[in-house]
Amino acid sequence: MSHEAGGDEMALRRRHPPTAAPLEDEDLLGEILLRVPPMPSLLPRASLVSKLWGAVAAAPSFRRRFVAHHRRPPVLGFFEKGDGELVFTPILDPPDRIPRARFSLRPGGDGDDFCGPFNSWVLLGCRHGWVLIVIRFWPMLLVFHPVSGDCRSVDIPSDFLQCVRDFSGAVLCAAGDDQGHVHGDCHSCPFKVVLVGTREKQDLTVAWVYSSETGMWGDQVSTTQPCAGLVYHLPGMVNRLPCTLVGNVLYWLLHGSDNGILEFDLDSQRLALIERPSSAGINRGNSRIIRLEDGSVGLAVFLYPTFNMWKRKVSSHGVASWVRHKIIDIHKIIGLPRRIKTGKGAIVGYSEDANAVFISVSGYLQYYAFIVQLESMQSRKLNQIFFENSYHLFADFYTAGTVPAIEPTQQQSIVPAIEPPQLQGGRMIQLISRIFVCTSIWWFSLLVSDCNVV
């Protein structure tokens, strides 16, 4: 009797083999790993659990699903020019913190001859994992991908240089949003470079588009009306506010008498000047063009203590207008007590990849910096002091080379390291030089006024 029962049990097992444990099922394990937050250290640490976990996490198909699931890459840090180098400053805490030297770059290599006298290169933009630099001495463009270390040079058309007075530019992934592509992991995709400049005599703006697929520049596109204020000149430096990509349209805030917005539609190849909101208090230091949650173009204006969002709406008759979208009490977002006497707010950077802004709040002997995600309106305090208002946020799905919780004495990097004391010293030198320039201009103006009086 017992022998027959045992035989029945073995036959039942053969008909219904035991199922794999949940964490040994590749499909189920893939769904679990898919929901790991996209911070740099989390997925690599999860892949160390077992060979199976590592194999699933390393599969290219899983990488594509992971990026598509999260859609928005985290902001890893920001880029700026300092002491002749493209300096990357990380903002995440260990173990997600990227080593500073990992993404930093000296555009001229070990020497400065490549960039010409006075180290004449300018950081124009940062988007979809690419960084765009113009070297004015040659002139040429550098398109740098920090994650892979890939750096490509692009010659600027001589026709463009001969007809423009000042210019700006942008780099973007060639794969559009309408193709189901998720930006933030775009190194394998071709890229485009857009240059816009103001003509020397007519004040008309022209645009050229370069494609890495063809290696060629397209035809020139021009506005039909004068458009000044593309580049804002300050004593001792040139400040180029980066543009914003909304859908497949690029927008530049203009500075000058008209204070408009330059719009370049990459699909229709149309370059036009549009109006910005007429609200008082909007200036180059407290505003940024942003992408709203519904995909439309917006304008963020930080008038402390309120954070305002405007939305551009187009009626069924094709008439465009700006309407106030949101008014937010910034104290509810950043958590500063109201008793703190602060007087000025600024937006110092924006990333449409992560839809996040850097903001600063300053007053008498007080300074605070935050990163704010515009959809959730969640904020995090940054241990930074921003001297300018044009920092380039870098967002990417990066999962290698992070800093452990206890940083080792020596860091391996693919580019020369930049030690924090040197960086701080360089910023101090920049600040002192700007104070010297402004003071010199002030003394010169007093001397001229005295001469006029005499």
Image (cartoon, helix red, strand yellow):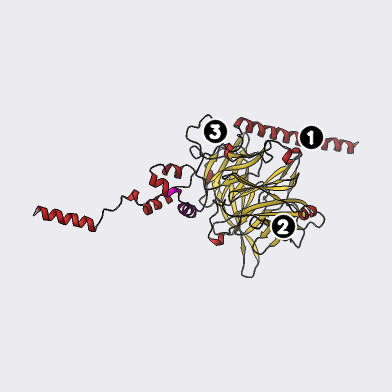
Label 2 neighbour load within 10 Å: few <14, some 14-19, many 20+: many
Amino acid type at image mark 2: Ala
Label 1 neighbour load within 10 Å: few <14, some 14-19, many 20+: few
Residue range (magenta): 56-71
Q: What residue would you read off at disc 1?
A: 440
Q: Is residue 382 visible?
A: yes
Amino acid type at image mark 1: Ser
- Number of marks in the rendered image: 3
- In the foreground, 407 or 424: 407
Query: Is 405 displayed left or right of 147 in the figure?
Result: left
Q: Residue at x 69, y 57 (%)?
A: 216
Residue 117: x %, y % from top left: 76, 38
Q: What residue would you read off at disc 2?
A: 207
Q: Earlier in the sequence, mark 2 or mark 3?
A: 2
Location of residue 182 with respect to 387 vertically, above or below? below
Q: Is residue 255 visible?
A: no
Q: Looking at the rendering, in which quadrant would you find the C terminus?
A: top right
